[in-house]
Image (cartoon, helix red, strand yellow):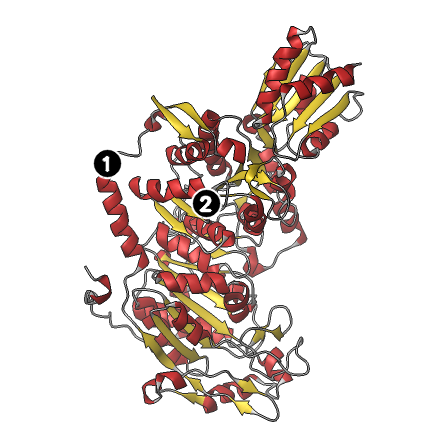
Amino acid sequence: MNLHNEIPAARPARKKTDLQRPLDELVEMYANIPARQFRYCPGCGLGMAQSAIMRAFHRVGVDITKVATAGGSGCYSVMGHYYKSNHIHGSHGRGCAYAVGMKLARPELTVLTLQGDGDLLAIGGNHFIHAARRNIDITVICFNNYNFGDTGGQFAPTTPLGSKTETSTQGMPEPAFDACKLAIGAGASFVARSTVAHPAHLTKMIADAIEWKGFAFVEVLQHCHVLWGRRNGMPEAMDMMRFYKDNSVLNPSSIPEDERFDIPIYNEDEKNVKFVLGALHKEQRPEFTEEYAKLRAKAMAKAPGKVKS
Amino acid sequence: MTKRLLLGNDAFCEGLIAAGVRFYAGYPITPATEIAEAMSRRMPEVGGTYVQMEDELGSMGAIMGASATGVKSATASAGPGMALMQNELGQAIVAEIPLVVINVQRAGPGIGNATRSGQMEVMQARYGANGEVPALALAPSTVEEAFSLTVKAVNLSEKLRTVVIVLGEGMLGLQRAVVDLPDYDKIEVLDRPHPDVPPGEFLGNYNANELSDVPPIADFGSGYKSIVSSVGISRRGGGDISVLGLSEDDQDFTIRRLHQKLLDRKKEITLFEDLMTDDAEVVYIAFGTQALSAIGAMHEARARGIKAGVLRLITIWPFPDEVVRGCCKRARAVVVPEMNLGQLRLLVGNALANTGIKIVGVNRVDSVTITPAQILNKTTEVLS
């Protein structure tokens, strides 16, 4: 039996939902945001990413009590607390490890990780690539703001070459990861990129990722004008929104696959930023929890009643 | 009841299974590898899941995630693997996620000697993680006890919503013995406290009012909004402090409660075996495999007319000071044989402070078991 060539079962027709629904109603349905405190900087892109995820929940039609999210440390780390879903807020970088445990233990849950770029690609890189390799049915959302924001703007594995941060005042000396390229290399079966400046597109990418059977990865370019932007000539939120708008290509199929990924360079002398947005990679592969369920069924049939001593 | 020839490491596995563990995440490491191997076969047989993670941090992460969904979960490691796990151990204890972690102690710092046995992680079990986290650690002495104590460990972890460390040893994990295994369906199995209010009235997984409270926890997917957080969000009356902001009072309440919920149940948690300590002028205090040498030395000493007794500690953390004092009422001297340079002796010394009792150790760090003769030699030396 060649499982790699199995055609996946047809998905049920998508429930028609109103994407124009006012945000207040969505908040009522999916979130639990205290009136007096909201812990992002004014103008931060995380609020937009948070709305897009909420809209994606609605678009997919999830039962929010059957959604489990995981995350660690970073500016984003309160996001999981705002939704009405279940959430594990653990240590820095372990989101994918928590998610693997949750999904394997309860495959009926819709499992997402909410992680920053430092969290996912620096300290949590190992868990990320191995979760992708397993092709376990979780959705990993990476909020890429080009730096470690929560600690005050140090460079991250995603910081564009040459750009200035608190620990690269002379310009970032190391080349950056392309998170999407890394995900594809590690075996992710769905990989997409979007930005907070393209909210409808971002919502669709996240919804598609949640619906995808297998490991799905969405890189969300999310501005941090307060720390990265200010040090690199874009001190206002709108400067960075324009930066994303002006440098994005929304039609990845028009670009050859090997040209969709580039190490971003951003300094006074040289700028190489081009964001190819959209679903960059899709590949049907056997999903880990389903494969494990088959293995378990075989083992249980071979050894009935083995639980007894 | 079934008689079986079991490897110590297999006895740990059967204990986990008998107590209802159905999720195991592992990473191979000598001398704990057999536990992962056995669980990879046994978990699917009993309807559970085995996953081999990318490192020990991953193993801990996966079992934290699995346990948050209500499935009893465990892992095992040794030496440097346990060092890596300390990060997540602290997170799980603060997040109050029930877990069992078996440490099959190897010898030496660093990579150490993978194939050799030791008792060098007594202090790590309590002070290994960052911040002021409490510990609950149990140490078996025999293969049979590796089974029964692991069942107890799972039950305590569930009942108290904490991480229980089983302090095994390479010498125990890799020895075979004939064990009487009880029928698993006759074993008492405890579950974590679940909310008894409807989802609308649930105030979160950290809704405690007293320092001794173990608040109910809602399994992920059970209809409740369940947040498990290692930020330390326990507070009187519940709610999610990560969003509201952590006050000094909340922080104080969180940390103190983590300890107090164990200390208030110390009687129930504390397991020990005392042999002939009533009239003992010398008491041997030991744990794990080395307690067996102490028992041998005690019989030998009694045969020579020395009033010796043994206190075999099974619960190492929280450290049972009262039990140590109670067993040393008549003692002039205490001998602590252990396979390290005096970690238990330090604790015993603390428990017996200002009593005037002489406390000496018999220590080996070469992984060669301490013999009863060595303990006897020390006894005559200290009593003379």
Which amino acid does the dot numbered 2 rest on?
A: Ile
Q: Secondary structure at mark 1?
A: loop
| Circle 2 Cα neighbour tier, 10 Å, few/some/many (<14 / 14–19 / ≥20) | many
- Res. B202 visible in picture: no
Q: Secondary structure at mark 2?
A: loop
Q: Chain of mark 1?
A: A
**Residue placed at 41% from the left, 74% from the top?**
A52
Look at discs 1 and 2 and give the one toward the viewer. 1
In this view of the protein, which residue sits in the foreground, B272 or B291?
B291
Q: CA distance from mark 1 to mark 2?
A: 32 Å
Which amino acid does the dot numbered 1 rest on?
A: Pro
Label ID, residue A89: none
Image quadrant in which the N terminus of chain A is located: bottom left
Residue B230 horizontal side relative to residue B336, left or right: left
Q: Are marks 1 and 2 on the same chain?
A: no
Tally the marks. 2
Q: Is residue A194 above or below residue A112?
A: below
**Residue placed at 56% from the left, 27% from the top?**
B289
The location of residue B123, given as percent across then percent down, is: 65, 39
In this view of the protein, which residue sits in the foreground, B345 or A15?
B345
**Residue placed at 44% from the left, 39% from the top?**
B192
Read off the residue under disc 1.
Answer: A304
Residue B67 horizontal side relative to residue A75, left or right: left
Residue B164 horizontal side relative to residue A11, left or right: right
Label ID, residue B217: 2
- Res. A13 visible in picture: yes
Residue B19 falls in image quadrant: top left
The location of residue A298, given as percent across then percent down, is: 23, 46
**Residue placed at 30% from the left, 67% from the top?**
A211
Residue B40 falls in image quadrant: top left
Residue sitting at the far bottom: A269
Q: Is residue A203 above or below residue A96?
A: below
